[in-house]
Image (cartoon, rainbow, N blue to C red):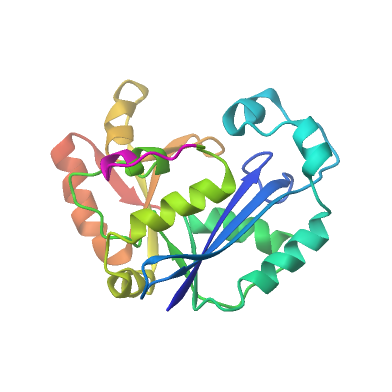
Amino acid sequence: MIICGIDLETTGLDSKTDLVTEVGAVLWDTDLNRPVKFFNKLIKIDRPLTQEIIDLTGIDDDLLSKYGEDPKTVWAELLEFQKPADYLLAHNAPFDRGFIEQHGFKIDKPWIDSCVDVSYPKEIQTRKLTYLAAEFGFVNPFSHRALTDVLTMLQLCSNFDWNETIENAKTPNAVMRAMVTFQDNKLAKNAGYRWDGEKKFWVKTVKENKINEETIKCKDLGFLSKRIG
């Protein structure tokens, strides 16, 4: 079975207004349990990057000017690259999938989300890619660069049964909201919830069949959570 891991670096979080600056993809053979083909492109954009994004990714305007390629060409090459894959994989798949589809390139294949579809041990609450790598004993040398993030994600997933991960991906997701005060926000963060800057509260995506388990866990940790989506 072939998995195509995908990661995007962007100018922000909104697929309708922000732009993609880098695309990374890797074809992973689950029988060999290793990568077999690589794809990595920087993309030219028509606006300057913010200092926050430069600091986060290490990608700056000069790098895009010198090495960036035409976005339409890059998207077309990505579509060709992923053709051998049976599944697409991303860490927080709705984010990457949203940007790809917003640019008019819908890939008609099932997606796996390594944030929620992998059966991580219960004691591991973080879903940040860099922290997950550390939990499994290795380091991502270039965090927030597309290709190395993809390889980190695939290496993590390779520690688990791919068939189980795929079965998990078939179960619908649910969005949970942590009912915490500002003073108690660390409780939500430590439980794997993330801050939604637009809606101004803490959220976490879980599998629909894990809602009750999540609710009980949060109560044991000292706060309530409820499904909002």
Residue 116 in sight from this viewpoint? no
Image spot of residue 216 (x, y percent): 16, 49
Q: Please tell me which residue lies in front, 225 or 150.
A: 150
Q: Quadrant of residue 223?
A: top left
Residue 201 in sight from this viewpoint? yes
- 176 sits left or right of 196 in the view: left
Image spot of residue 101 (x, y percent): 68, 64
- 184 sits left or right of 2 in the view: left
Q: Quadrant of residue 158?
A: bottom left
Look at the picture and state if 87 lies above or below 182.
Answer: below
- 32 sits left or right of 98 in the view: left
Q: Which portion, as a residue range, is magenta?
A: 134-141
- Numbered disc total: 0
> Looking at the magenta stretch, what is its main secondary structure?
loop
Q: Residue at x 31, y 27 (%)?
A: 186
Look at the picture and state if 106 lies above or below 142.
Answer: below
Image spot of residue 82 (x, y percent): 60, 71
Instruction: Residue 140: say if magenta.
Output: yes
Q: Residue at x 28, y 59 (%)?
A: 159
Q: Residue furthest top?
A: 183
Quadrant for the N terminus in the image = bottom left
Q: Quadrant of residue 61?
A: top right
Q: Residue furthest left?
A: 220
Quadrant for the C terminus in the image = bottom left
Look at the picture and state if 4 lies above or below 214.
Answer: below
Image spot of residue 200 (x, y percent): 49, 34
Q: Residue at x 60, y 34 (%)?
A: 57
Instruction: Residue 11: say if magenta.
Output: no
